[in-house]
Image (cartoon, rainbow, N blue to C red):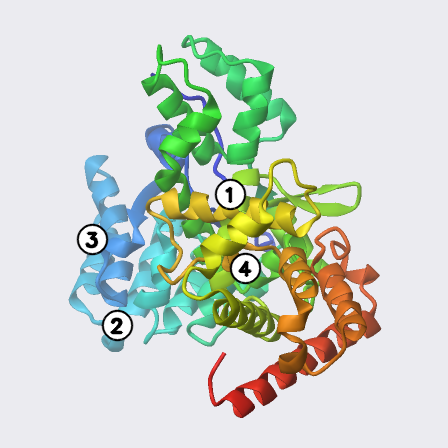
Amino acid sequence: MCFASLVICFLLIYIIPKGGALGSFFSFQFYTIILPLSNTIVKKAEDYYERGIIIINCSMNSFANPESFFKGIVDTVYEVLEDYDDIDVKIERRYNKVVEATLEEGCVKNIQSFFKLLLKSGKRVICVIDEFDHSRKLFSNFSEGFNILRELAYQPETDVTFIFISRRMIAELESSAGISTLANILGKPIYVKGYNDEELEDYYLRNEIYGISISEADKEQVLNITGSQPYWLDILMYHYVQSAGENKDFESLFNENCGVFYNEYERLLTLLDEQHLLEKLYQIVIGPAYDYTKADVQKLYDYGIIGIENGQATLQSKKLLEYMEMKEGVFDFYPLWNRTERRMRNLLKYKLKEKYGDTWEEQIKELYIKPECHHMSLGGYLSTALDLQNKVSNQKDLYIQTASYSIIEALTTAGLFAFYVKEYKLFQTALGMDKNEFSKITAHLTKARNPYQHNNDDLIDPAFKSLTKGYCELLNKKIDLFEECENLTI
């Protein structure tokens, strides 16, 4: 079996212009590598050596400390020279000086001298460093490490070309060390994302060579699941091939292997969270919009996570959107809004239990969920919430906390407020306002939650944001007073 993935999911290439120098500095950022870089560069090392270019490859997470890392680079270069029986007395002497000294005793100077001598002898070095994310730990107490790399790459006397493979941006990695030595000299990044339409068709055509052929309808399902991300595509196609002869569609394959995909979605969300982009993504595709910027939208678009259709941002993977919606209740992407919704849901459950007793959930399902009820009625909202509640309870390997997930947690914002309006007599004393005033507030907050209303930051009226904030604060104040009177915590 063979899958024809040819690119990595997220890739940034930075090039540092070097006045008059032949070398350049690259930085690759990605989510998941499909085709190892060794296939395009490292495997051609022998051809490059004949042209005076030494190519080495190492993984940063295999080094325990900065000294072993920098010495390891020199060791690897020296081993290549040994393989080609290309070591003279000067090279050997410089190499021994690197080995014998510590970082504190001038090892860095010896490393620079080693590469200067190589360049003078007509040899340049391209160093591929995998797992560059590990620099956050490796250089946590040695921020000079970033500067050493910068000098080796930037100075024409050494002219080392580095290719960094990382899941995070250089600026983020350096921020953990409180410095900026590499990022501030990088050029404009070039992003390579998931497949575009043409590349996706090439992917399917190449797979047909190996007897893997799917219909146009299947391709639509595949796109909804993977968002055209190569690694996710390969996971899905792997399970498709494994199930050959079982006549399963891709939706069924996803449901059977959802834990694998949720694991990948979680990895992505964790990376976005570390870059302070996760809450922006929630605001953009789910709402409510609060403080995301055009730059945030552009960055997520550059990564290939969102697409722009008719001026609105959409997630490429519909299954990723579903996963985000399931996690929404346990992720504080907008603390005031999140707290307000959580307390409103808790107040609703408290009052329903007060009226219906311990079996309140079963009773309201029986009372309101009827066959063919309108989707925007309370019964329709509850029916949709019931489907989500069942889905969450049936899924395994979810990265969702195991706290109570009643049908009230599963309700959309519109459904939550529809329940309040329907049963408002239960809450009028607790909220201290008449039904018309409450309906006005909830209509605004439901609109604020609408993802289609707020997909362009420049269209969001500051007054609308301010009013949303004021209404959230008002509802919290009402619940505070209710808690004080009842001597309880919602």
Q: Amino acid at mark 4?
A: Leu
Q: CA distance from mark 2 to mark 4?
A: 39 Å
Q: CA distance from mark 1 to mark 4?
A: 26 Å
Does label 1 or label 4 sit earlier along the sequence? 4
Residue 4: where, in percent of width, then height? Answer: 45, 22
Q: Amino acid at mark 2?
A: Leu
Between marks 3 and 1 in the image, the one whose residue lies nearer the viewer = 1
Horizontally, residue 377 falls left or right of residue 338, namely right
Of the pair 188 and 237, the residue shown nearer to us: 237
User: Element at badge 2?
Assistant: helix
**Dot 2 alpha-carbon crowd within 10 angstroms: few under 14, some 14 to 19, many 20 or more:** some
For residue 452, above or below residue 85: below
Of the pair 375 and 301, the residue shown nearer to us: 375
Q: Amino acid at mark 1?
A: Asp
Look at the image and tell me in which quarter the N terminus lies. top left
Does label 2 or label 3 sit earlier along the sequence? 3
Horizontally, residue 429 falls left or right of residue 456, namely left
Q: Amino acid at mark 3?
A: Glu
**Residue that mark 1 sits on:** 387
